[in-house]
Image: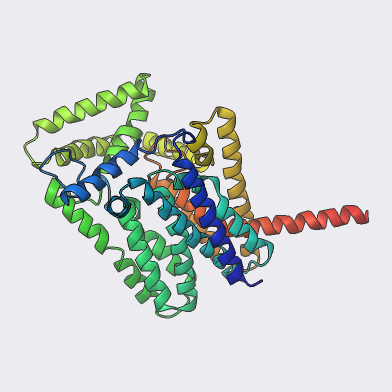
Amino acid sequence: MTDRRIAASYALIAMCAHALLIGLSLVPSLRAVPLERGDAITYLMTAENIVKHGSFSRESAAPFVWEPYRTPGYPLLIAASILLTGTHAAVLFLAAVTSAFAAWSAVRLTSVFGGTGAALHGAGAVSALLPNSLGLSAMMLTDAISGHLMLVWLYLMITGCRRHSVVRLAASTMVLVALQALKPTFAIAALLVGLAVLLFYQHDRKVLVLAALCLVTVPMPFVLASRNLQAHGVHSVSLLGVETAREYLQVRYLQEQTGEAYETLTRHVREEDRREAQQLSSPPSLYGRLYLVKEEKVNRFVREHPLAAARLMLTEMVQQFAAPQEFFPQVFVGDLPAWGRGVGSLLTLGLWFCAAIGGYTLWKAGNPAPALMIAGVLLFFLVTGSISHYVGARLRFPADMAAVPFAGIGLSRLRTIALKSSSSLREA
C-alpha cells in the first residue's frame, strides 16, 4: 500500500471521525458544554454583525466600530455558515474537512522524513483521533482549524523547500495567510518561515527565498493593524496581547504579592484601567485608550520586575506543555476531575515522548533538521502563550499537530524495540 493511499485512508477516517463527533456534540441531550460560551461568544457577535450590518464589530448598536481583539477570518466563516445554512453551528463541520487535510499531510510528511509502514499508520491514526483535535473541532473556536492548517502548512513548507518547488511554497503562503486571518499569533509567523527555510532550503538562492517568503507574511498583519489604527488609534494587529499580559501575567504577580483572590484582583485591575482610560482625551476610541493604559502598566511591570515576569512566563510554559488531552471528553461530560486531567496529561506527555523519540531517530540517522524544526515550533507556541493563563492545551494545539509525524516515527521505533526485545526473550 503506497503512502498516498495510506494518507487518503486516514484523511477519510479523520473526516468521518470528526464529522461524527461534531454531529453528536450538537445533540442537546449529549452536549455538556454550551456551544456559545467564553471566546465563542465574541466570534458569534462579530459574525452576526457581519451578516446584519456588514460590519466586523462586536458592538450591539451603531456605530459598529472595527473589532479590536479578534481577527476577521473565523467570524467570516461563521457568517458564511449563517447565510448558507441558517445556523452558526454548521461552521463546526469545516473542522472535519481541515482534519482530513491534516491527516493527509501527517502521513505524507512522515514519508518525507523516511518513515514507512508502522510510522505512516501511527501518524495517520494519531492525527485522525487525537482527543484535543476531536474536542476542539466541536467547539466554536479557531483552535481546531488553525491547528489542522498548521500541519498542512508545515508539510507544504518543508516539501516546497526540499524540492525547490515554487508551487508548494506559494501554497504554503496561502495557508499561512489563512492562519493569520484566523489567529493574531501568526502575525509573527515569519519566525517559523525563516526557521523552515534555513533548515530545509539547500540552494544558493536561500537568502532570496527567505526574504521573499518572510515578506509575504507582512501584508495581512499590516492591513489588520492599519484598521485598528484607523478605528482605535493603535497600530497593532490585535489589542488582545497587551490586555492578556495585564490581566493574566501581571495579575498573577499581584496575587503573589497581596494574597488576594485572582478573580477579585482581575476585577479591580479592570475597573482601575477603565477609570484611567476614561480620563484620557485621545485616542477617541475607548478601546484604544484602554490599550495605552494597559501597555504602560505592562511595560513598567516588566521593567521593574523582569525576573518575576520571566519566572511566571516559564511557569505557564511548563503548565501548557503538560496540559491534558481533555477537550474530547469535556464536550460530553463537562470539566474533568483531577484524575481525568491527570490521564489527559499522560496522553500529552506520551505524544511528546514519542515525538522526541522520532526526532532523535532522525537526528541519529544524520537528519537533524526535522527535530530542530519541531523544537522551534513547540517553543514558538509555548512562548507566545506564556503571558496567558487557564487556557489548557488550546494555545499549544498547533504544536501538537506539528508533532504528529514525529510521533508516528517514534511509535514505529518503539514498536521495533519491543519486537526485538520480545524476540530476544523467546530465544532465551
Can residue 233 be seen in this snapshot?
Answer: no
State the residue at coordinates (27%, 47%): 70
What's the coloring here?
rainbow
Q: Nearer the viewer, residue 27 or 427?
A: 27
Q: What is the total number of numbered labels drawn onto the structure image?
A: 0
- Residue 138 occupies which quadrant of the picture? top left
Q: Nearer the viewer, residue 296 or 287?
A: 287
Q: Is residue 107 visible?
A: yes
Query: In the rendered view, does 388 fall on the left or right side of 358?
Result: left
- Looking at the image, which residue sits at the far right? 428
* Residue 64, quarter of picture: top left
Residue found at the very far left of the displayed protein: 281
Give the x, y percent position of residue 209: 37, 74
Percent x, y for residue 251? 33, 29
Q: Residue at x 37, y 73 (%)?
A: 170
Which quadrant does the N terminus fall into?
Answer: bottom right
Give how far across and how far down residue 159 sits, in percent.
49, 72
Q: Can you say whether 380 is above or below 248 in the image?
A: below
Residue at (45% x, 68% y) in the render: 156
Q: Which residue is situated farthest in the bottom direction here?
A: 204
On the image, the x and y values in percent for residue 231 come to 13, 48
Quick one: 428 or 4, which is closer to the camera?
4
